[in-house]
Amino acid sequence: MLAIRLIAEPDRLDVLVLPVRAADPAAGNDTTAEPVSTAVAPPDGTADEAAALVPAARLNGRAGEIHTQLRPGRTPGRLLLLGIGGGDEAAWRTAGAALARSSADEMHITIALPADVAPAAVRGLTEGLLLAPYRFRMTEAGTTPALSSVDLLLADPGSFETIVSTARTTAAMTHLARDLTNTPSSLKNPQWFAEQVATAAADLPDLRLRVRGPDDLAAEGFGGILAVGGGSASGPRLVELDWHPADARTHVVLIGKGITFDTGGISIKPVPAMKLMRKDMAGAAAVVAATLGAATLRLPVRVTTLAPLAENMVSGSAFRPGDVVRHYGGTTSETTNSDAEGRLVLADALAYAVQQLKPDLLLDLATLTGANAVALGKRTAALYSENDQLAADVREAAEAAGESVWRMPLHGDYVEYLGSEIADLYSAPAQGAGSVLAALYLREFTGDLRDRWLHLDMSAPSWADGDQAEVSRGATGWGVRWLLRWLASVD
């Protein structure tokens, strides 16, 4: 990962970056942007040169705008003017991402930060710098960015060390979630995923890890996980990862859907829809990475993560539409569609969390429905909760992290659609409103935690078709960034 130093005096100035803020239209300025006064004065003449370049280059200062000025025989040899928009955290994150991509051929750059720069802005810049260059490749071919180090020039570097360290951990955990999600399912089965968690957790001795295999799941009655994983030669798993600091006052359980590949089962998907189904465990990747991040940052909140893992395959032992599944705790589901498998494994995990872990707050993240993307597009997750404060807190954390959510309704009059003639519930009613009905189904397993439960349907934002700001093509690691912010705020 890119090395980032906080310094008060530069020891090398190959490339100097100076921020340019978008002008305030209300101020009546003739120019469209203005250079920012930096905490540490740049070399003689550089500031005046930047001031002259802004109008000459017709810069508007939008976040991520970059203008390069070559300065042969002088120091610095290259001057970059970087647009930071209005200077808020989101704008700095976008600016950092643009800078990392545009400077990929440089070895080292120095960024002179504003005299009044806020900690949130430094966090945004650091996250943008670290997240944007991410690439997942399983070959040695191709080019690797030359950029290896960035210096942040500040008057008081020490006061920003904690915020940069937090941003670095956040980026590292996001990279981990991206790696787990991007890995092809020729490698990634439930056992492999569980082994990756064990390897990562081994570096954090205060974490407790338990992995249940098929025999354990059968003995304890996890019928949903066993049904979904029953058609695969790679047996299912349930990962339970626990961070329990001594000073924790609140216990949060995070649950992430972990389907390591989804064919749709007997209700088989068409080929175009199946191609990217290695991403169907992005929820599990996010909650695992967030828990590892919480332990790394030593957040004073207990976090227990459950990752129900299964491979939904077609075979003679696969579960069928019309089968009745008995979940943990005894509730039964009539499986109307084997391609609605995620809610079956989540139901087991929710029931187990409520009955055995008894947390204060219960959240699940799942690449659950295509209906989410139809309603909200590619970059926004659907949020469901009956708890207004919890929903507001999560939305605030998500917006601050640059991960969009939108609260959706839990219509009470739709509950009747869940009724089955032969079981307690239909797993996937046919009446439409797919994302809402999936959330209502999951709510049936939350017991007395119903008013402290939150569900995120995150299929669409878990994957990006191209680079955009700090998001790189492929798995986005969606959820890690806002989870860490939210967990840090939990009392």
Image (spheres, grey):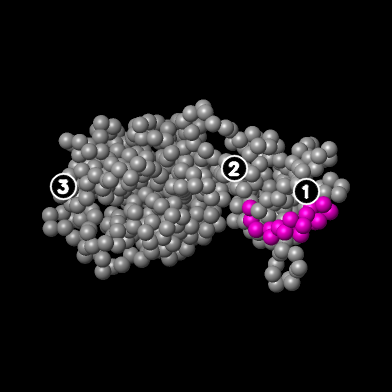
Residue at image position (28%, 45%) is: 270
Q: Is residue 276 left or right of residue 244?
A: left
Q: Which residue is identified by label 3?
A: 323
Please provide the residue range marked out in magenta: 48-64
Residue 143 figure quarter: top right
Residue at image position (49%, 44%) is: 473
Q: Which residue is identified by label 2?
A: 130
Is 161 in front, or is 313? 313
Q: Amino acid at mark 1?
A: Ala
Choose the circle earlier in sequence order: 3 or 2.
2
Residue 361 in view: no
Choose the circle earlier in sequence order: 3 or 1.
1
Q: Secondary structure at mark 3?
A: loop
**Residue 138, position in %: x, y?**
46, 30
Q: Which residue is identified by label 1?
A: 155
Question: Does the magenta portion include 40?
Answer: no
